[in-house]
Image (cartoon, grey):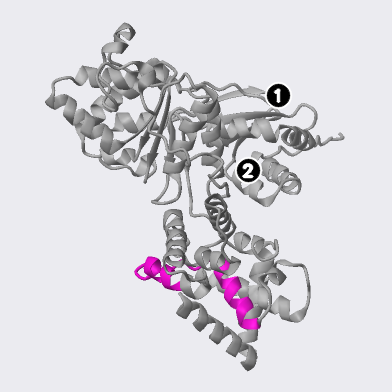
Amino acid sequence: MNTQTTQFPMAKNHDKVWSDCLTVIKDNISPNSFATWFTPIKPIQLVNNVLTLQVPSQFFYEWLEEHFIDLLKKTIKKELGPEGRLEYSIIMDNSQSNSESSPFTIHAPTLNKKALKNPPVSFPIDLNKDKNIPNPFVIPGLKKLNIHPQLIDSYNFENFIQGDCNRLARSAGLAVGQNPGKTSFNPLLLYSTNGLGKTHLGHAIGIEVKTHFPEKTVLYVSSEQFTNQFIDSVRNNNQNDFIHFYQMIDVLIVDDIHCLAGKEKTQDVFFHIFNHLHQNGKQIVITSDLPPVEMKGIEPRLLSRFKWGLSADLQVPDYETRIAILQKKIYNDGVEMPREVIDLIATSITTNVREMEGALISILAQSSMNKKEITPSLAAKVIEKFVRNTPREITVEYIQKMVCEYFSIPVEKIHSKTRKREIVQARQLAMFFSKAFTKSSLAAIGSKCGNKDHATVLHACKTVKNLADTDKSFKKYVDELENIIKVKM
């Protein structure tokens, strides 16, 4: 009796399919775009030629659909055939994900199911009484359009420099400014450490709204102002008027929301104001030093609402972004400054944009008052006051600068494709010290050293170590450079 063995095609794995897709995608877009928009995506499952991908937010999904849909279509069909489909699983409120399948589109709800089943509670408001509601910012006898937005004109999008450090936050902010209350990121939570631009971005959103919708009532307020006004309303026994005032706002921007920590009654009243605005399609923008998961002393019911929209962080800007920020500031002020001074500021103050701009203003002031030319020497004396008590962060750019100065070669040579021995050696040393002294990944180091990959960086580090162990003159280079980097810090 003859037996016949039937061979079935090997089932495809969702991780393998997405990995193969990423290989194609990576070759068709810039490294920055790939890192920003594709690295965070996680493949979930592959069923009946439908690949499910988990994305961090609906904003993330919308960006993919708007900018990369054609590339995704071609890639999915290449891997799964003409019947290949794509499904997104969008993280909502860190709890229940909502996903919807379609050939390459998805229309996910703005709120999760839990939020819809338990609609927020709000205080009632009689809109016919608007004219009688006291305005804590102007005078009693309020008319809605008389509310001053408290926005700083110079804090606009034009003056907000975009980089890898803030691309997501800026893109989301611009979308909110052009379509307030209508996007999926409501509320929009912007968070970062001090001095990285979240307050600037909050004002920019408000200015953008007023530009496109002058009839809308926009209000920027610090959490401290909000708290003090609430205390006054309690003292004057007009809490309802205080609540009604804030319920009239179309776009409410609250700065430093983390400062409400431990203030239970203030949180309670903000909770009701938040619910009313959100239910009525009004836009809420809040800023914080911390992401929701790290906020202590904030009630869980408020934290859960902060997670309804999008939380976007602003990170420390890289060297190129810091240079662009300084150049924009100098251009706006109508002054000139030597490039080496700009470079000195950007390499000396690396973690706080506000301090960096403060140093720039101080240098200009010293030059003007003392009628002295702006020189690196003058700039160094001013900068010293800003960084004296703050350890300077070691960056890849700083290390490249030190290595190139040591060998008397232009920094641009390290970024070039030249294979000259002295340039290759300097590039390898820069990679070696970048791995030793910074927290940057091998891929990040390579991208800043002539767009090399992580394998090249790893090879460079091994080469430097081997040469240092076998070549006394090369060992001298390594030791001297290490001391220079440490001393300069």
Q: Does the rendering let one see residue 298?
A: no
Estimate how packed mark 2 is, as few (under 14), some (14 to 19) or many (20 or more) residues with alpha carbons within 10 Å.
some
In which quadrant of the rendered view does residue 148 lie?
top left
Say the numbered circle drawn on residue 453: none
- 101 or 162, nearer to the observer: 162
Q: Is 324 on the left or on the right of 378, as rendered?
A: right
Question: Which residue, given by chain and number where applicable, does mark 2 sit on?
Answer: 38
* For residue 39, above or below residue 382: above
Q: Secondary structure at mark 1?
A: loop
Q: Looking at the picture, how far across and down is residue 247, in whole percent? A: 33, 19
Residue 106 image point, x, y percent? 62, 23
The magenta stretch spans which residues?
380-407
Q: Residue at x 27, y 15 (%)?
A: 123
Q: Quadrant of the N terminus?
A: top right
Q: Is residue 198 left or right of residue 46?
A: left
Vertical order, 154 against 477 (above or below): above
As drawn, 290 above or below 319: above
Three-letter amino acid code of the residue under disc 1: Pro
Q: Is residue 404 magenta?
A: yes
User: Residue at 49% of width from left, 26% of height from top?
Assistant: 210
Screen quadrant of the C terminus: bottom left
Q: CA distance from mark 2 to mark 1?
A: 19 Å
Q: Which label lies toward us, 2 or 1? A: 2
At x 44%, y 37%, the residue is: 202
Q: Identify the main secondary structure in magenta.
A: helix
Residue assigned mark 1 = 103
Q: Residue furthest right?
A: 2
Query: Looking at numbered disc 2 in the image, what kind of residue is underneath it?
Result: Phe
Q: Position of residue 240 (x, y in %)?
A: 22, 17
484 or 339: nearer the viewer: 339
